[in-house]
Every structure is written in C-alpha cells, then in structure tokens.
Amino acid sequence: YTAKRSRSGTAIYDAETDSHRSEQLGVIGELNRAIAEDELVLHYQPKVATGTGELVGVEALVRWQHPDRGLLPPSEFIPQAEDDEIIVALTDAVLEMALVQHRSWREAGAELPVAVNIAAGGLYDNAFPDRVAAALARHAVPGAMLTLEITETSIISDPAEVQAILDRLRDLGVKLSIDDFGTGYSSMAYLQTMPLTELKIDRRFIRSVHESASDEAIVRAILQLAAALNLKVVAEGVESAAALAVLETMGCSYAQGYHMSRPMPADEVLPWAAGRIRVPVGS
Ligand code: C2E
Ligand code: MG
Ligand code: MG
Ligand code: MG
C-alpha cells in the first residue's frame, strides 16, 4: 500500500501537502496513542425505510475524544490517516468497536445491521478480508449483519485488485455499499462486475431534491439504474420532511439524515428507536 495511490493514482509533488507534513505527523503520532488508549468512539446514525420509518440499520461514524481538543469529527483526522499506514489500524479498531456494539444491541434484543466506512487504504490490503472474517468469527456476528461502505474513487484506483478483495468479502456474506454515489468521476463499468448490494446517493443531490428539478432528475436516474442492477438505494443527507416525502414518492426505499436523526452515541440508539419507530427484534 502506498499513500499516494489511495488518493489519485498519480504521485505528484504538492507543495501544499509538504507544508502540512509536520502538522500531519503530529496528528498521526497522536492517532497511534488515540487507538492504543481507546480515544476513538463511534456514533451511530439510523438508516430508515422511507415508507414506514422502520429502523433498518445504523452507520458507524468515528469521532476522536481528544484529551485537550474535545470531540473531533472525522474531517479533523480521517484525511490525514488515509494518507498513512495508520488507516489499517484505525479501520480495524472501528470494525472491532462496531461488532462489539452490534453484539451488545443483540443481547438487548435488537438485531441491528451495522455499516462501517472503509477508506481506500483500508481496502487495498490483501489481508483485510481475512481480518474481517476473523473479527466476525470472534464476535459470532453473521457476515450479513455487516455492510462496508466504500467510495467510487477507491474502486477506480485499481479495479482488478479491489475486485478480488470485494469478492472475498462478499463470500463472507458481507454487504458492500457505494458511498457518496454520483460524486466520483468514473466509468460505471464497475457496477456490472463488483459484488455490490447498495448505492448511497450523495447528500448534495438529496438536500434540495424536493425543490430542484435537476436534483430530482439525477435521483430518478440513479433509482432506475439501481433497480435495473438489483441494488438497494439509500438517500443520504435527508434534512427535511419535504425531501423525505419526495424520495418516498419516487420509490427510494431507504434514507438517512438529520431529519430522522443525527449520529448519536451508542447508548442513545435503542431509546431513540423505541420512542420513534419499530426495532427489528432478533433472537
Ligand atoms: P459519510 O460516510 O458519507 O457519512 C455521512 C456524513 O454526513 C456524516 O458526517 C454524517 O454525520 C453526515 N450527515 C448525515 N446526515 C446528514 C444531513 O442530513 N445533513 C448533513 N449536512 N450531513 C449529514 P461525519 O460523521 O462527519 O463523517 C464524515 C465522513 O468521514 C464520512 O462520510 C466518511 O467518509 C468519513 N468517516 C466517518 N467515520 C469513518 C470511519 O470510521 N472510517 C473511515 N475510513 N471514514 C469515516
Ligand atoms: Mg458512509
Ligand atoms: Mg456518504
Ligand atoms: Mg463521505
């Protein structure tokens, strides 16, 4: 794994990157400590069925409980981590926490599928499928309870290598989702070959879908494409009842967004679900 490939596939010297180097090294060093000392925490955002409001799963979103700087959003450290080998340890730590949490919800009676975001550097790692398999086995979680969210850009940088890795993940029963769909500049050939289960429409097309003809046209096109390819669709960034209503009318089955809930600490998820919508009850 080389850091540059994860971003663009080309290694171009970039003065701006260089000037941030020492600052980045600081973040990376601190992240090593953060992982070792359990400073990373996951918040969870509900994914709901647009028609019934039923909770169908949650997305795990990492935050850093920094001793001096407070609770840091992923934008403060994920971009730096993605350009460094530490993304492997970070990905493992997040996966571990998400599976432990899934188990804990299951013990409380809720079988809640959980989605984890995987950066390119976490995906381009031949040992990754084996580590996912080991983590699932360690926590006795069926593969189908786990969705991995990846971006178009990370597929494009080396389709042959990623195909092999995704096929192995799919063999575990793990579900594969394309995050921020519609924002990568790509051929769509990968949609025919990669073993995908879901597309998440980027929030830039969703926020104003109820009042923008061009957003609506794009969302319709994605829904049609997904139906033809037998992929589920999740609309991200649903911020209003108006957007949710239009999405339901258009036939978009699933949604996430501030209108339903912001990402929240794990211990708030079941109370939220019980108060607002039905939780699928597991064995
Ligand atoms: P993402 O995977 O596309 O996650 C959705 C982001 O949109 C989250 O931001 C979420 O809080 C935010 N969001 C959800 N609903 C709404 C809405 O209605 N309106 C608006 N404006 N925003 C909404 P967050 O938690 O700050 O995460 C940002 C990104 O950081 C994620 O985008 C993902 O790419 C990355 N990320 C988060 N956790 C992880 C992780 O564990 N590993 C990796 N590799 N990346 C992560
Ligand atoms: Mg995501
Ligand atoms: Mg997204
Ligand atoms: Mg994103």
Image: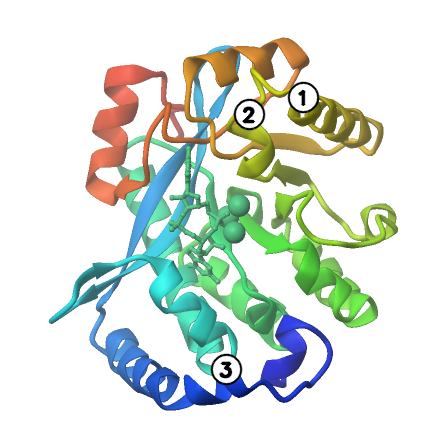
Q: Is residue 259 left or right of residue 201?
A: left
Q: Considering the image in quadrants, where does the N terminus appear?
A: bottom right
Q: Is residue 206 left or right of residue 8?
A: left
Provide the secondary structure element on which disc 1 rests. helix
Answer few, some or many: residues within 10 Å of disc 2's Cα (few below 14, many 20 plus, some between 14 and 19): many
Q: Looking at the image, which residue is at 87% across and 46% down?
A: 192
| Alpha-carbon span between mark 2 and mark 3 | 40 Å
Residue 16, numbered label: 3
Residue furthest left in the image: 68
The residue singled out by tag 1 in the image is 216
Q: Is residue 102 above or below residue 72?
A: above
The residue singled out by tag 2 in the image is 254
The foreground one among 95 and 154 is 154
Res. 142 visible in picture: no
Q: Is residue 30 above or below residue 145?
A: below
Provide the secondary structure element on which disc 3 rests. helix
Q: In this view, does 220 lie above or below 194?
A: above
